[in-house]
Image (tube, helix red, strand yellow):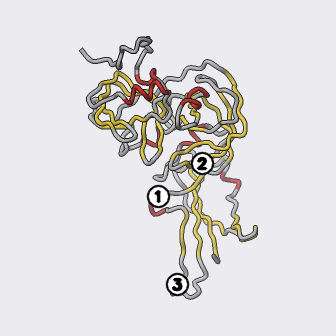
């Protein structure tokens, strides 16, 4: 490369973008190109959006060629928010770009939330990750790793420090180096949504990623190789999965057949293996009340309309 330029624009307090400005980057750190956006960004706007353009020297070519990172032709940029009171889960999760990439990808952050997938879930499920959520709003949930953390329980308010990564298309916090329980016994209501909101081609499935959600009065429409399709009155399918489920919930889901009805299905909405899905945690997420089946007589439970 013979020239690298950083282009950036600042969003004002009303959320409108300013004009693009350019900054020449310097090759001064062992072939690492460095450019620093003016510190005046902080305090003057709500966000800074940027991309990088790299040009070659044109040798043995008909013209100098330039490539951009990321693919701005598809509306994807990089950026960061103007933060004064700490970085929230919303700050980490919210992405205005089609790629869904976090503005803080590859950055170490400290953030706070209420645990929704705890140590018992971590040990019993296949997915092997925790989850937490700051409030019952979109963009407010996130998956995180924490195998070295002390035991966490649902309802614990925790502060963690780790690295934001994009894990196969899902934003999560990895390499968690510390975690502190700030309070216990907190209640967090799931986001009450429809299956149409969580469908693969819905307008904003990314906004529910990592959130505790609930859908009601659903019917099983297909039993797939790795998951199940369900629909509500909207007649639009979304997926449920058992990667975070206890053995009891996993066995129950394995017994589901087409046209089975469930009063509610709850779980952590997640993106993995190329699809969005509700990750069921336990029997409570399937609307089951834990009826004693010590004699092994009950095959499964369901609540049907009159």
User: Residue drawn at (65%, 36%), measured in percent from left and top?
Assistant: 146
Element marked by disc 2: strand
Quickly name the residue at label 1: 75
> In the image, which disc is placed on residue 63?
3
Residue closest to the eye, 14 or 55: 55
In the displayed structure, 195 sits above or below 42; it is above
Q: Nearer the viewer, mark 2 or mark 1?
A: 2
Element marked by disc 3: loop
Residue closest to the eye, 38 or 14: 38
Q: Position of residue 262 (x, y in %)?
A: 34, 23
In the displayed structure, 9 sits above or below 107; it is below
Q: Is residue 210 visible?
A: yes
In this view, the residue farthest toward the left is 306
User: Residue drawn at (75%, 69%), measured in percent from left and top?
Assistant: 30
Verify CB contact (< 8 Å) between mark 2 and mark 1. no
Picture mark count:
3
Location of the C terminus (image quadrant): top left
Q: Position of residue 242 (x, y in %)?
A: 45, 33
């Amino acid at each position: 490369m013979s020239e690298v330029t950083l282009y950036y624009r600042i969003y004002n307090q009303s959320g409108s973008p300013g004009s693009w400005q350019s900054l020449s980057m310097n090759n001064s750190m062992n072939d690492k190109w460095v450019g620093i956006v003016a510190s005046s960004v902080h305090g003057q706007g709500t966000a800074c959006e940027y991309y990088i353009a790299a040009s070659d020297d044109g040798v043995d070519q008909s013209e100098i060629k330039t490539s951009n990172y990321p693919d701005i032709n598809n509306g994807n940029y990089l950026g960061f928010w103007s933060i004064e009171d700490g970085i929230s889960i919303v700050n980490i999760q919210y992405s205005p770009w089609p790629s869904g990439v976090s503005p803080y990808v590859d950055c170490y952050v400290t953030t706070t939330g209420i645990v929704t997938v705890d140590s018992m879930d971590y040990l019993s499920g296949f997915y092997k990750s925790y989850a937490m959520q700051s409030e019952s709003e979109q963009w407010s949930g996130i998956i995180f790793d924490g195998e070295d953390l002390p035991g966490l329980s649902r309802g614990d308010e925790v502060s963690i420090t780790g690295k934001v990564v994009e894990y196969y298309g899902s934003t999560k916090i990895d390499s968690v180096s510390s975690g502190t329980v700030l309070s216990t016994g907190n209640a967090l209501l799931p986001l009450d949504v429809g299956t149409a909101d969580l469908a693969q081609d819905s307008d904003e499935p990314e906004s529910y990623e990592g959130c505790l959600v609930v859908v009601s009065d659903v019917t099983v429409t297909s039993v797939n190789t790795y998951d199940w399709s369900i629909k509500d009155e909207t007649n639009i399918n979304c997926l449920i999965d058992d990667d975070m489920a206890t053995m009891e919930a996993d066995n129950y889901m394995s017994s589901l057949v087409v046209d089975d009805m469930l009063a509610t299905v709850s779980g952590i909405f997640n993106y993995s293996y190329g699809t969005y899905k509700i990750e069921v945690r336990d029997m409570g997420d399937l609307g089951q009340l834990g009826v004693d089946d010590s004699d092994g007589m009950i095959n499964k439970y369901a609540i049907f309309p009159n």
